[in-house]
Every structure is written in structure tokens, then in C-alpha cells.
Image (tube, grey):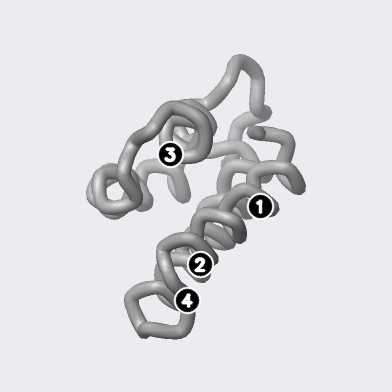
Amino acid sequence: MPRTASAPSILGRQLDGLLHQGKSIDEFVDWFIHHLWTIERDGSDDEIRLSAAINNRLAERSGGYATDAETIEGLRADANEYGTA
């Protein structure tokens, strides 16, 4: 059962690194791929929804439907929607 979000999540911190601290999108993708299952298993409902939105954004990027800049802007919108910005 998902837990309730409390302190800033590791997902939120990693996303913040991409959006505000200069982490490259490739670094974020590498981290995200390795942690997605854990987030889906142990995350709060909002973290799980955010991870699904991130997964969709990254699929658009890897499929050539979105540039890196468009992906980052989409991730920024997702972070704002789920309160991690």
C-alpha cells in the first residue's frame, strides 16, 4: 500500500536537480530508470502518479516526439501539478 508523502521525496529531489540545479536529462533518466520500480512499490499516491507522468514524458522523448527542452518543460509542469517544484 502506498505511503503518505511527508518530507521531500527522493523523486522530488532528483527532479529538482534536473529542473533547477543543472543535472542533465540523461543523468535524470539513468537515475529514474533504476528507481522506478521502487517508487511504484513504496511511493505515495502522488509520487506514483508523478512517476507515471514522468515515464510518459520520457517515452515521448525517446520516441522522438519531444525535444529535450520540451521534455524538461513538460516535467516542470508535472512537478508543479504534483507539488514537487
Question: What is the tally of numbered marks visible in this picture?
Answer: 4
Q: Secondary structure at mark 3?
A: helix
Q: Position of residue 71 (x, y in %)?
A: 50, 63
Placement of 66 over or under 81, stated as above or below: below
Nearer-N-terminus badge (4/1): 4
Disc 2 and disc 4 in contact, CB within 8 angstroms: yes
**Displayed quadrant of residue 1:** top right
- Name which residue type carries label 3: Leu
Q: Position of residue 34 (x, y in %)?
A: 24, 48
Q: Nearer the viewer, residue 62 or 55?
A: 62
Nearer-N-terminus badge (2/4): 2
- The residue at 58%/42% (across/down) is 47
- Name which residue type carries label 2: Arg
How far apart, in angstroms, are the residues tagged by discs 1 and 3?
A: 13 Å
Q: Nearer the viewer, residue 12 or 70?
A: 70
Nearer-N-terminus badge (1/3): 3
Residue 18 - label: 3
**Displayed quadrant of residue 59:** bottom left
In the rendered image, which residue does mark 2 sit on? 57
- Image side of residue 82 versus residue 42, left or right: right
- The residue at 37%/83% (across/down) is 64
In the rendered image, which residue does mark 1 sit on? 78
In the rendered image, which residue does mark 4 sit on? 66
Q: Secondary structure at mark 1?
A: helix
